[in-house]
Image (cartoon, grey):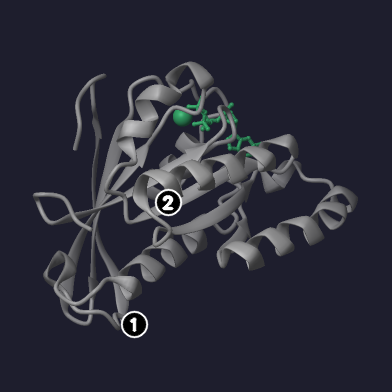
Amino acid sequence: MSDENNSLKLVILGEGRVGKTSILQKYFYKKFDEGQKSTINPAFYEKTVSSNGKSHQLKFWDTAGQEQFNAISKLYYENAVGALIVYDVSIYETFNKVKEWVKTLQEVVGKDIVFIIAGNKFDLSNKDELEKRSPEIKEYCSKENCKHLYTSAKTGYQVDDVFDLLIKTVINKLKPGESKHKRKGKNLEISEHTEKKEKKKGGFC
Ligand code: GTP
Ligand code: MG
C-alpha cells in the first residue's frame, strides 16, 4: 500500500532505548550519538530508490518506544508496507517486546506486512549469551517467516545491510500497479537521501 503521495511507508519499532533513532541516524547520516535523547515527536526520513529503472519514494518513520507514547505510535504504523523491529541484544527481555510489536503490527496492517528484526547494540553483546538465545530467535523467525540481523548503530555493523534487506524485500513484494510499479525489482540501487522531517504530535503522513 502507498500513501496519497505514492510513497511507501516503513516504520521502525521497538522498546524504548533499543537504538531505533540511532540506527536511522547511522544509516542516513553516518553518525552516532552516545547521548541520543528519547524520541517524543515521531519523525520521518526519506529516501528514493530505483529498481529496474523505476523510482520509489520511501518514508521511514521513527517512533517513540516508551510506553507512554505507544498510543501515538500505533496510529503511525497504519498503512505501513514494511517495518524494522529493533531490540537490544544486551537486554534480552527487549526481544519479548518484538513479539508484541509484530502481533500489534499484524493486527493493524495485516499479515502481509514485511518486517525484519534487528538485534542492535551488537558491540555490547556477549558471545555466550548470543549463542544461548540464538535457537529461540531462529525458531521465532522461521515461524514468522522473517529475517534477523545483528546490528550496531555505534560501529555501523550491518546497518546498511539491514536497511537494504528491508527495502529489497518490500520492493520485491509490491503488487503490480502498487506505487505505480511492477514486482520483480532485483536491480535495486539507492539513489538519494533527503533530510529528516519532524512531525508534531497529532500529525500524520
Ligand atoms: P526511544 O526514542 O526512547 O524509543 O529510544 P531509541 O530506541 O530511539 O534509542 P536511541 O537511538 O535513542 O538510543 C538509546 C541509547 O542507546 C543512546 O544512548 C544511544 O547512544 C545508545 N545506542 C544506540 N544504539 C547503540 C549501539 O548499537 N551500541 C551502543 N553501544 N549504544 C547504542
Ligand atoms: Mg528514538
* Amino acid type, mark 1: Lys
Q: Give the x, y percent position of residue 87.
A: 62, 42
Q: Is residue 43 visible?
A: yes
Q: Is residue 91 visible?
A: no
Report whether 142 appears left or right of 38.
right
**Rendering quarter of residue 142:** bottom right
Residue found 32% across the figure and 56% down from its top = 81
Q: Nearer the viewer, residue 202 or 28?
A: 202
Residue mark closest to the camera, 1 vs 2:
2
Tag 2 residue: 83
Residue found 50% across the figure and 59% down from its top = 162
Report whether 144 appears left or right of 172.
right
Mark 1 CB lies closer than 8 A to ligand 1: no
Tag 1 residue: 186
Q: Nearer the viewer, residue 166 or 159?
A: 166
Above or below, 21 relative to 192: above
Q: Give the x, y percent position of residue 61.
A: 33, 40
Q: Nearer the viewer, residue 64 or 156?
A: 64
Above or below, 110 relative to 108: below
Q: Give the x, y percent position of residue 107.
A: 42, 46
**Disc 1 to disc 2, C-alpha distance:** 20 Å
Report whether 129 appears left or right of 6.
right
User: Label 2 crowding class (10 Å Cα cut-off): few <14, some 14-19, many 20+?
Assistant: many
